[in-house]
Amino acid sequence: MTADTEQAPGFRPRQSPQVRQFAVGDELVLVMSHQQVEVPEEAAGSRALTLNASGRAIWDLCDGHRSLGDIADALAQAFSVDRAQLLTQAGHALSELSQLGFIEGFDQRASDRS
């Protein structure tokens, strides 16, 4: 992944306004509301998702202002994990969340270049 990809203005994931979230200990349950949501056919049954603590940390950083690189930087600082490893892992997580319709503003190509 290049610095250009990390900072590309189009790659600013944000939580979909159609998602409701419920904290359960360290985990987070995401539920897709049924109002005007287009979900890919292969994800049609995926209306709810449970995130573990690391998935929740990524989710919490999806504010529409941070790029994938910014998210990896914040996670690296918070968890003392290698940034390059986090770019790959966060990219995959964001890609899945995007494909399921839980986040917006994330382009799969950003993850593919890691």
Image (spheres, rainbow, N blue to C red):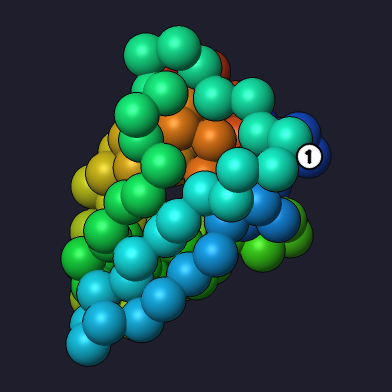
Left or right relative to 14: residue 93: left
Seen in the picture, residue 3 relative to 31 is either above or below; the reply is above
Observer-nearest residue: 26 or 89?
Answer: 26
| Residue 41 seen by the camera | yes
Q: Nearer the viewer, residue 25 or 35?
A: 35
Residue under the image location 33 percent in, 71 percent down: 28
The image quadrant that residue 80 belongs to is bottom left
Q: Position of residue 113 (x, y in %)?
A: 43, 20
The kind of secondary structure element at disc 1 is loop
| Quarter occupied by residue 87 | top left
In percent of width and height, residue 39 lies at: 55, 25
Vertical relation: 61 (above or below) 101:
below
Query: Quarter-wise, where is residue 112 in the image?
Result: top left
Image quarter where the N terminus lies is top left
Is residue 7 at least partly visible in the picture?
A: no
List the single residue furthest toward the right. 9
Q: Which residue is mark 1?
A: 9
Q: Nearer the viewer, residue 17 or 58?
A: 17
In the rendered image, residue 106, in percent from the top left (x then y), is placed at 61, 35
Which of these two is toward me, 61 or 1? Answer: 61
What residue do we see at 26% from left, 82% from top? 24
- Residue at 34%, 29% (x, y): give it: 45
Residue, far bottom: 25
